Amino acid sequence: MVARVIPVDCFDLVIFGATGDLARRKILPGLYRRWKEGQIPEGAVIIGAARSEMNVDGYREMIRAALDEFLNPSERDPEVMQSFLAMLDYVAIDARGEGGWKALAGKMRGDMVRAFYLSVAPALFGDIAARLHEHGIANRASRIVVEKPFGNDLESARALNDVLAGHFHEDQIYRIDHYLGKETVQNLMAVRFANILFEPLWNAQFVDHVQITVAETVGVGGRGDYYDHSGAMRDMVQNHMMQLLCLIAMEPPHHFEPDAMRDEKLKVIRALDPLAPGDLVRGQYSGDGGDDYLLESGNPDSMTESFIAMKLQISNWRWKGTPFYLRTGKRLKSRVSEIAVTFKEPPHSIFGESNLWRENVLVIRLQPDEGMDLRVMIKEPGPGGMRLKDVALDMSFAEALGNDLDIPDAYERLIMDVIRGNQTLFMRGDEVEAAWAWVDPVIAAWEARGDRPEPYDPGSTGPEGALMLMHRDGRRWREIR
């Protein structure tokens, strides 16, 4: 067993929805890895809370099976696993009733950090928050973690924020977006703000355009009913992609601390121009057999988009005139998430027309193979004059920092930030509401027009309209490999 270090204070962590998929697949395996690395103190207690009636031994066996399923074989250490399972406790609880709350209150210890992870439907947030206070379980030092969706529109987001604010202060509320916990997303901030190389060029004078792509190969699958009431705009753009856009476009904060970061992100959202109808393309995958959105969603008349592409404009001094192109979709050619910053061409070429200029592009890969590369022009080796060739200065994190580098899962980092009381990578309530205030009119406009999503083939790069969105501007999407 590894030598233990105690970088955080002792804590009680209660996971509501502790028998659900997210808890078994992400949260508990992530906590196991942090325990294995010595980042969780010996006296910490993790309490599962769910409707299922079982004792603590039964819950530990459930989590043991989940760890066997979701951990890599190299991560499994019998001694470490046994000690991790020993810190687990369990209480059967009724989120909307009184059952189990007194038992949970009796498990709380002293004045140490108390964190409550709500891996449940948003409809239960208010009930759980109220009972945490009614039974004296939560105090001023407690933290509450809530998963998306943060509402379905501006009105519901405000209502959700009001419910949480009725029981917790804003500095106690952690709205978790796992994209912000990805190592590459945080390296984006380091690349921008820790190097003089890029920041002077990070503006409309030097950047031609920015592309943000989040492509998935899977369909809606078992999430068909939820997804059909959400769609790509609500499921991906309003939260994940909006956050990536903010990190790319934000001004440097005065300090790397929570409110300074979130103030700058909020300014970006508020500077977004209203979206013109011609700057939006919606798609829906349509194929033979069962590989079809209408069949998978169970709604043969669905108008919900499984793909969306758009051109955004930010009206501020830094970015006025530089378009940001966003696209995301399901059943696409490959699984890839990346940000590509394309710089403008030199004002004059000294090498003649025979040498075609290739764009300088900085690509930040979020998945797979987290890393970055920068495409630059060099002389092609050999005699025969000055022939230019574009090459990539490639940095894979695994290769640059060691092939055995263990990059923590996003949930691991974010949960430990909750325990440490660091809200930098979590969304603030006004951020969420500002994003919905921009998204709601876009959705209302296409619903009023009765726009039907454009069909596209599963395994393709999306609908033809998305290609034309770029083509009319004399640009092309980066290839989804």
Image (spheres, rainbow, N blue to C red):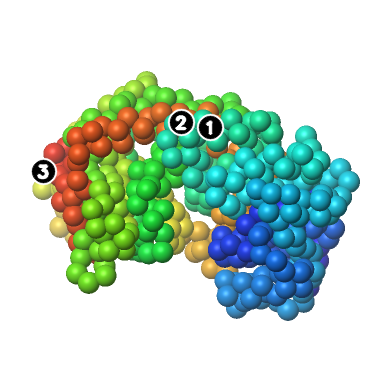
For the residues marked 3 and 2, what is the alpha-carbon distance in whole angstroms? 56 Å
Mark with earlier residue (3, 2): 2
**In this view, 376 is above or below 23:** above
Q: Which residue is mark 2?
A: 155
The x, y position of residue 430, in whole percent, is: 53, 28
Q: Observer-nearest residue: 410 or 94? A: 94
The residue indicated by pointer 3 is 353
Say whether residue 475 is visible: no
In the rendered image, residue 439, in percent from the top left (x then y), is placed at: 36, 34
Q: In the figure, residue 408 lies in which quadrant?
A: bottom right
In the image shown, does 114 or 464 lie closer to the viewer?
114
Measured in 3D between alpha carbons, the distance from the residue under mark 3 to the one under mark 1, in whole angstroms, is 60 Å
Instruction: Decide which of tag 3 and tag 1 comes sooner along the chain.
Output: 1
Q: In screen coordinates, is 196 left or right of 257?
A: left
Image x and y of residue 2, in percent: 77, 69
Residue 159, numbered circle: 1
Tell me the element at label 1: helix
Front position among marks 3 and 1: 1
Left or right position of 67 against 343: right
**Kind of residue sitting beneath label 1:** Ala
